[in-house]
Image (cartoon, rainbow, N blue to C red):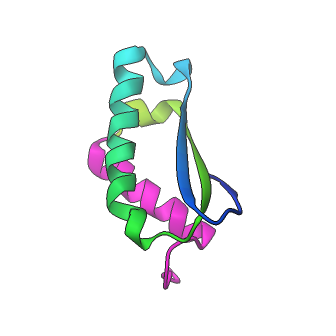
Amino acid sequence: LTYLKARELKVGFSVSSKVGGAVVRNRVRRMLQDDFRHLRPELLPGRYVISVRAVAAQASHAQLTKELRYLFDKAGRVKGGTDS
């Protein structure tokens, strides 16, 4: 997760060809976009770039959701963040 200070909330996903073929990359990107849509109201403004690693191709949607939330919590970008 890369964060840049900004007034508005924007996100980008970087999924390299190391993740898999086009179908796999697009599936992973769609799952992350869906997760981000649900997290959006809880996030602080800024520009985020999420770089996806090859291991994401074997991860379930639940695992990706958990990891995305963990990244934002760890970065301290969640409103009223958790300290876990």
Please say if 1 is above or below 82: above
Q: Is residue 16 left or right of residue 23?
A: right
Image quarter of residue 5: bottom right
Q: Residue 78's spot in the image, x, y percent?
A: 50, 74
Residue 58 appears in the rendering: no
The residue lying furthest to the top in this view is 21
Can you say whether 79 is above or below 44 in the image?
A: below
x, y percentage for residue 26?
A: 37, 26
Q: Which residues are drawn in magenta?
A: 60-84
The residue most toward the right is 5
Residue occupying the point 62% across, 55% down: 47
Q: Nearer the viewer, residue 79 or 57?
A: 79
Establish if 56 lies above or below 80.
Answer: above
41 in the magenta segment: no
Q: Is residue 8 visible?
A: yes
What residue is drawn where x is 37% and y is 58%?
66
* Residue 68 locus on image (x, y percent): 45, 55
Image check: 63 left or right of 56? left
Give the image quarter of residue 3.
bottom right
Quarter-of-image position of residue 20: top left
x, y (%) of residue 75? 62, 67
Question: Which residue lies at the image location 58% right of the left edge and 62% below the top edge?
Answer: 8
Viewer-closest of 58 and 46 = 46
Q: 8 left or right of 20?
A: right
Q: Residue at x 32, y 41 (%)?
A: 31
Compared to residue 12, the image places residue 68 above or below, namely: below
